[in-house]
Structures are given as C-alpha cells and as structure tokens.
Amino acid sequence: MNNHLVAAPLGAAYTPRLVCTTGDRLIHPADSRNDLARIVVRWARRWVPETWPAREYFDALGIGDAEVPCYDDESVTGWLLMEPQPDSLAWQVRTGRIDIATALTAEAEAWPDPRKPLRPQLADPTR
C-alpha cells in the first residue's frame, strides 16, 4: 500500500478519489483545447467555470448557482485533467516546488469548512 500522495497524470479522467488542489483544471472529454472548450478550475475545494462555455454547459443542465457558479466533484467526473493555472498551488505541486500535503494544508487553512457556500465576505464599513 502506498502512503504517499501523488499528482495524477495530465490527461487522466477525473474521479472524486483523485487529489486535486487549487489551480488544477479539467476539460470536458469531448472538447479540444480552444476558446470553445468547457474548462473548469479547482477553487476553494470546488470547481468553477474558467470558460464561458463551461458556465453555459452547467447552466443548461441546471447545475450550480447563477450568482456564484460552482460545481461538486460528481458534476465533473470523467473530465480530463489538464495543465494547472500558472503559479497556483497545483502548478507548484506539479513543478516540485511544494508537495501535495503542503498544498492541502494551505487549502485547509484558507477554506476550513468545505460545506460553507462560496460567498464573498464584505468588510463591515463601521469597523
């Protein structure tokens, strides 16, 4: 049994068992890498649309919130892992700058409760 976390290879089909970090990106398996591709990016332990076609795709399926669109792991199962966003945690893992455990720790500190909805927190102007 392997006790070490490893990054999934680019091109792998996503399943909720894969460990992904902020900045990892997925492309719909039927798409080519172009401006019309449905691409989502990992953010705050969820998937958010990186391209307009991805947002339209999930809107048509009735998945996600129109105000703050985000999708769960099951919604993108089978999508293909592609290169992460530059300078993201995922990019740092893939380039060997940090290990996955460090990236997951940073995410846990930034977003301690994955069940909380993604809503911007506005500063209180009276403080």
Image: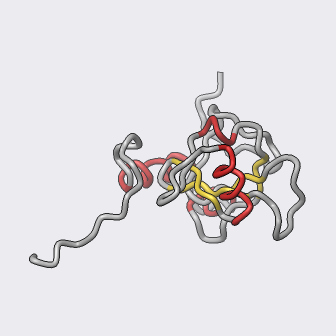
> Which image quadrant is residue 5 in?
top right
**Residue 124: percent from the left, percent from the top?**
17, 72
127 horizontally vs 88: left or right: left
Between 51 and 95, the one nearer to me in the picture: 51
Residue at 65%, 39% (x, y): give it: 75
Please say if 83 is above or below 104.
below
Q: Quadrant of the N terminus?
A: top right
Residue at 61%, 41% (x, y): give it: 19
Residue at 60%, 35% (x, y): give it: 4
**Residue 32: percent from the left, percent from the top?**
90, 59
In the picture as drawn, the residue positioned furthest to the top comes out as 1
> Which image quadrant is residue 76 in?
top right
36 horizontally vs 24: left or right: right
Please say if 18 is above or below 124.
above
Between 122 and 96, the one nearer to me in the picture: 122
**Residue 79: percent from the left, percent from the top?**
76, 44
27 horizontally vs 123: left or right: right
Residue at 82%, 70% (x, y): give it: 35
> What's the coloring here?
secondary structure
Q: Quadrant of the C terminus?
A: bottom left
In the picture as drawn, the residue positioned furthest to the left comes out as 126
Q: How many marks?
A: 0
59 horizontally vs 79: left or right: left
**Residue 118: percent from the left, percent from the top?**
41, 54
